[in-house]
Amino acid sequence: MLIEIRCDKFREKTIGFHSGLNVVLGDSVATNSIGKSTLLMVLDFVYGGESFLDHNKDVVDELGHHDYFFTFQFGKELVYFRRGTHTPDLVYKCDDKYSEVDPISIEEYTAFLKASYSLGDIELSFRSIVSLFSRVWGKENLDVKRPLHSFKSQKPSDCVTNAIKLFEKYEPIKILSENVKNKNDEKSTINKAAKTGLISKTTKTKYKENITKINTIDSEIEEIKNNLKKYAVNISEIANREVMELKVEKDRLLEEKLRLDSRLLRVRNDLNQNKSIKSKHLEPLVKYFPDVNTSKLEEVESFHSSITKILRKELKSSEAELASLLSSICEEIDLIDTKISTSLAELDNPTIVIDRVYELSQDHSVASKEIEYFEMDTQIKSDLKEAKELLAAEKARILELIENILNDKNRRNVTAIYSEEKRSPTLNLGQNSYTFDLVEDTGTGKAYSNLILLDLAFLEVTALPFLVHDSVLFKNIQNDAVAKLIDLYESTGKQTFIAIDEIEKYGDVPEKKLKAKKVVQLDNKNVLYIKDWRK
């Protein structure tokens, strides 16, 4: 726990702390800008925070750079440190006289605090654990409707995850999340391989076709194996089978060639017939019809000639394309004719059996790989879906457990502070978001009371080591409720730091308790630092 903070800029050079509740007292008229919130920011700075440097720049501007010396007690051991505003990324280990011993980084320092407070099993940094629950004016964690947000731009999903980690329930989610990640990586690898052409992207229809193809190939190979002697004596059967396959393909190509020949013939006829009328052709027309308007006819003919040129260009393009396709098909037909001739020429050559088996095995290999990749892709998708469902189910189970623990603790605390008739706020944790329902009472005082009670619930049921609450949280809470909250802070058995003023209004007993727990008292004349720059 924190034992003391020293600073030569403090009016009281040393401020000591104790176990349980530590109170920074203001005066009876709630004077502002006397140092209550600033001291809580200094506490946050001592615990490795940065908000003091950002929000309280006026302290450095008025006092210059300065150092804070502080002592912790862990078990029976006292440890001493110094952290300054000039080089806040360095923390110095000190001896009991606060003489420097060894400089360490702020990361090493907060890691030391995490270990010393026995928080090693929580998969969060020390600052991620404590920063949310240091609620001081100037930080971004005072929104009563978003109590799990350490800062405004924080993702709700991260807030939910942090709550799970604080409850030390993250390990099964971590394992399942890693499994989902691995499955996603496998799926991504398959997709990349398919895009780059390393494997064939197979559809379900092609998959079924490949299974049929494999069965056909297996049957033929089995037939060859079982009738090898027969094929050795008369291998014309296997040759004829291959010739038949080639003929079927040739017939298909011949049909395509016939279709293209017909199209090409039509195009060439169109080219031959696509001629324009020349001026000399108009002379017989004038002879029989002297009054005809030849200028108009020539104008029409000029337009017709322009259209003809465009059509001829398009027809020429189609002619070239069709001729190219026809040439390609003719080459394929010639290749098939060559294969047929070769096959028929080798009827007495036993190697045709070997060639056929080799060809079948190649087809079998391609089809098998496509089947394998399709089944692998299908299995990965199925595994990924199952992994996501398991993760969602486990996360939902854990979130429900955390909800129940916190809401039950809230209900008990609300009953202790108010009465059994009062409805308690409800925290609802979703997979990637959360809500904090403040029931029908949405007044400022009740809202901040609900925020305090939620923090106290976290403090009681998790390993959270301390709380820091500023006076702004208590301003509008009804007096008798504040009096009972004081008892709750004390009952946690952990260090809590609060700033509060106007304590007389809470009654004699709460006033005495608060004074007994004070660590410093500030007022209009006795401010935190040696300099008062309000005027």
Image (cartoon, rainbow, N blue to C red):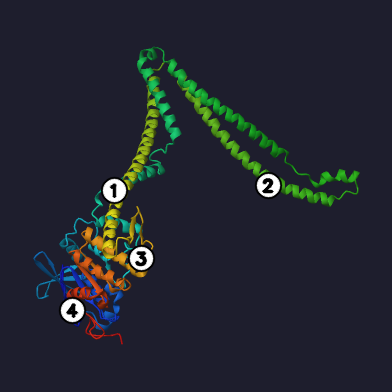
Q: Which residue is mark 1?
A: 178
Q: Which residue is mark 3?
A: 152
Rendering coords of residue 219 (x, y %): 39, 21
Q: Which numbered disc, 4 or 3, marks the residue that appears first in the sequence? A: 4
Q: CA distance from mark 4 to mark 3?
A: 32 Å
Q: Which numbered disc, 2 or 3, marks the residue that appears first in the sequence? A: 3
Label 1 Cα neighbours within 10 Å, binned few <14 / some 14-19 / many ≥20: some
Q: What type is the residue that disc 3 sits on? A: Lys
- Tag 4–tag 2 contact (CB < 8 Å): no
Q: CA distance from mark 3 to mark 1?
A: 28 Å
Q: CA distance from mark 2 to mark 3?
A: 66 Å
Q: Which residue is mark 4?
A: 7
Asked whether the viewer can see residue 47, the reply is no
Q: Which numbered disc, 1 or 4, marks the residue that appears first in the sequence? A: 4
Residue 243 circle label: none
Q: What type is the residue that disc 4 sits on? A: Cys
Q: Nearer the viewer, residue 218 or 76?
A: 76
Which corner quadrant of the image does residue 277 belong to? top right
Asked whether the viewer can see residue 264, the reply is yes
509 left or right of 254? left
